[in-house]
Image (cartoon, rainbow, N blue to C red):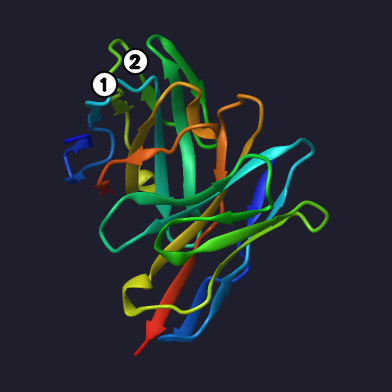
Amino acid sequence: EAQVTQNPRYLITVTGKKLTVTCSQNMNHEYMSWYRQDPGLGLRQIYYSMNVEVTDKGDVPEGYKVSRKEKRNFPLILESPSPNQTSLYFCASSLGGGFGNQPQHFGDGTRLSIL
Amino acid sequence: AQSVTQLDSQVPVFEEAPVELRCNYSSSVSVYLFWYVQYPNQGLQLLLKYLSGSTLVKGINGFEAEFNKSQTSFHLRKPSVHISDTAEYFCAVIRSGGYQKVTFGTGTKLQVIP
């Protein structure tokens, strides 16, 4: 089954404790992206990746890091999480050509709460 | 820079009534436009997209949208809604021609009343 898998689905942690949210897709997609969703603000793009070793900033990259060492994985790293990063996070992927030409497939989301 | 405005944060509508969800965008270059739907506790699913060609775009679940370049709008419509259409709907824009940064609107919650 074609899918985008995020882990963990839920996490409560404390300020300053490094964490990683993993994202994996089994569709051989080139393009992958991370979003955060906050009430009243919709989805905002954090980072995206056009292919292995190619990443770029979205609208809200501050406080986040990403890496794309393998095509299927695109982890989101919070080196020193802060309460303003409490949010619902989505990973998405699509075929080459990126968002413009192909539909995005979204994961089920990761709800992060940082105390 | 590009932006998307969804003026209506919530739209209540009776079952079997028509609905229009509004989306306006701003961009200095040509764009691609999308509508996504998010059901409770799920990720987003593509409803429809406008890349080029006919300005009336038909999507899944009986939804359609019309691209109006002069009014910079891409409103979503359905002639008769069902309870199952209760969800949050997001309009999104990306600059055409391969630039991959995408901007979403703030979302419209459609509540279908029996």
Q: Is residue B59 left or right of residue A87?
A: right
Residue at image point 25% right, 47% down: A108
Mark 2 surroundings within 10 Å by alpha-carbon count, few (fewer than 14), some (14 through 19), many (20 or more):
some
A16 lies above or below A65: below
Measure how far apart labels 2 and 1 are at the Cα level: 6 Å
Q: Are marks 2 and 1 in contact (CB under 8 Å)?
A: yes
Residue at image point 16% right, 36% down: A1
**Looking at the rendering, in which quadrant would you find the N terminus of chain B?**
top right
**Looking at the rendering, in which quadrant would you find the C terminus of chain B?**
bottom left
Residue hosting label 1: A73
Mark 2 element type: loop
Inspect the image, locate mark 2, and give the three-letter code of the amino acid beneath it: Arg
Q: Chain of mark 2?
A: A
A39 lies above or below A65: below
B55 lies above or below A5: below
Query: Where, by quadrant of the figure, is residue A90 drawn?
Result: top left
Q: Is residue A52 left or right of residue B51?
A: left
Q: Residue furthest right?
A: B70
Q: Chain of mark 1?
A: A
Inspect the image, locate mark 1, and give the three-letter code of the amino acid beneath it: Asn
Residue at image point 58% right, 73% down: B20
Query: Where, by quadrant of the figure, is residue B96 drawn?
Result: top right
